[in-house]
């Protein structure tokens, strides 16, 4: 599996996602601009001592990622989607894309994949779930469907 964070802003969210990726052998892709330095102490602390175990790549923009990484299906996590994350039949090399914490994914990216947008169900009372929580929820559904292959 692949997790892509487009323009993440909060270091401890990215650190938590990195830790989840390390513990599930999920590749983590960070798309610039980043709202923090990769040397940020909050980022490092949230990822604990898992940084050496994370397969992580930083991209200059989303299109560089698309042009370079040859993976499975691409799914965009957005509160604007009509389909829920658990209605997808995930494959081992699929890609789940998340936007930044304050704005989500830009319309320019969402428009490219109108039939590949997914959401986590929640009340519409303002903000959405935390980015790290959403990533974990969707990733673990994909891993469940794949019968947690390679995990104990």
Image (cartoon, rainbow, N blue to C red):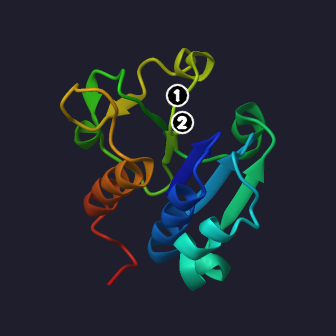
Q: Is residue 21 above or below residue 151?
A: above
Q: Is residue 109 visible?
A: yes
Q: Is residue 51 above or below residue 35?
A: below
Q: Which residue is mark 1?
A: 103
| Residue 100 % position (x, y) | 55, 38
| Residue 48 % position (x, y) | 55, 80
Crowdedness near tag 1: few (<14), some (14–19) or many (≥20) residues, C-alpha within 10 Å: few
Q: Is residue 26 visible?
A: no
Quadrant where the C terminus sits is bottom left
Crowdedness near tag 2: few (<14), some (14–19) or many (≥20) residues, C-alpha within 10 Å: many
Q: Is residue 37 above or below residue 79?
A: below
Specify whether 59 is left or right of 148: right
Q: Secondary structure at mark 1?
A: loop
Q: Residue at x 67, y 71 (%)?
A: 41
Foreground label between 1 and 2: 1
Q: Secondary structure at mark 2?
A: loop
Q: Name the residue nearer the viewer: 91 or 128.
A: 128
Q: Is residue 147 above or below residue 115?
A: below
Q: Which residue is mark 2?
A: 99
Q: Name the residue nearer the viewer: 59 or 90.
A: 59
Distance between the alpha carbons at the discs numbered 1 and 2: 7 Å
Question: Do the numbered discs 1 and 2 sit on residues whose CB atoms are within 8 Å?
Answer: yes
Where, by quadrant of the figure, is residue 51 drawn? bottom right
Q: Name the residue nearer the viewer: 2 or 37.
A: 37
Kindly give the residue lying farthest to the left in the view shown: 123
Specify whether 1 is left or right of 150: right
Q: Which mark is residue 30?
A: none
């Amino acid at each position: 599996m692949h997790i892509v964070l487009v323009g993440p802003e909060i270091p401890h969210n990215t650190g938590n996602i990195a830790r989840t990726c390390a513990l599930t052998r999920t590749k983590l892709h960070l798309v610039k601009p980043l709202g923090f330095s990769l040397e940020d102490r909050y980022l490092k602390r949230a990822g604990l001592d898992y940084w050496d175990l994370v397969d992580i790549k930083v991209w200059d923009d989303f299109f560089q990622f698309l042009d370079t990484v040859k993976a499975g299906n691409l799914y965009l996590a957005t509160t604007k989607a009509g389909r829920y994350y658990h209605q997808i039949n995930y494959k081992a090399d699929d890609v789940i894309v998340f936007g930044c914490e304050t704005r989500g994914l830009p319309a320019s990216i969402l428009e490219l994949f109108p039939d590949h947008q997914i959401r986590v169900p929640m009340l519409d009372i303002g903000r959405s779930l935390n980015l790290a929580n959403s990533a974990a929820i969707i990733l673990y559904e994909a891993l469940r469907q794949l019968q947690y292959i390679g995990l104990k």
